[in-house]
Image (cartoon, helix red, strand yellow):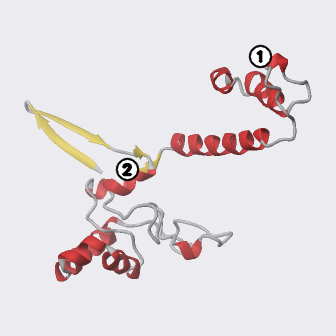
Amino acid sequence: MRKKFVIDQIRVTFSFELVPSDMKWLAFISGELPNSAKYFLSFANVSNDDIAKVGCSYGGPSDDFQPWEYKNRVKIANAVAKFKNKLTQKQLAARTKVTEFIAEKKSRQEFEPILGPLIDKGFAEPLHLANNNWQFLFLELFEYVLHSKTAVPYSCKEISDLPVDCCLRKFLSCLKNEVKANRLRNAIF
């Protein structure tokens, strides 16, 4: 999307190629229901019913899943606004009728996107996804280590006091030597 501005008789033109964000912000700025909705993905018409499908494709005219197009977002948002006008304050507060109506439309769009057509340039910043994946992996490994059958003596004050075959000692050694995560290692022990 190109925007033109005139500043002191100088024409300035710039364009956006991408709008980086995290998933929660992207859903908010898109005017969508949160990621807990039946259609949970800000990028395509993937629903809870489609989660288990394998080998699907995205984006092309004959692909299984299609991106949300701006013109359709606006069309759904206008239909939702009309539907909301028919509801009582109590029904609006409960939100069940609204979310069901949006799901019936096979959408997650509640409002018109705040960024307008620029929303088509939105993408989820992979940093957040990577951080969440590393956190999940670390917590799973750490839980396994803590529930291992190796007992940690109460007299242990240093990592070197742990038995050589201790799962915790091996884990902490790996954090230091392989992963190079000394601050995380020191925070644990």
Dividing the picture into quadrants, the one containing residue 189 is top right
Q: Residue furthest front?
A: 154
Residue 9 falls left or right of residue 64 = left
Q: Position of residue 15 (x, y in %)?
A: 31, 43
Q: How many marks?
A: 2
Q: Amino acid type of disc 2?
A: Trp
Viewer-closest of 158 and 106: 158
Instruction: Determine crowd level at label 1: few under 14, some 14-19, many 20+ residues with C-alpha closer than 10 A.
Output: few
Write the residue at 37% across / 64% down.
Answer: 33
Instruction: Kindly identify which residue carries mark 1.
Output: 158
Q: Is residue 133 above or below residue 160?
A: below
Foreground disc of the pair 2, 1: 1
Q: CA distance from mark 2 to mark 1?
A: 43 Å
> Which type of secondary structure does the marked residue at label 2 adopt?
helix
Residue 61 falls left or right of residue 34 = right
Instruction: Determine crowd level at label 2: few under 14, some 14-19, many 20+ residues with C-alpha closer than 10 A.
Output: few
Q: Amino acid type of disc 1?
A: Glu
Give the number of the disc on residue 131: none
Write the residue at 79% across / 43% down.
Answer: 147
Residue 130 falls left or right of residue 177 = left
Give the number of the disc on residue 25: 2
Q: Position of residue 76 (x, y in %)?
A: 30, 74
Q: Is residue 32 above or below residue 104?
A: above
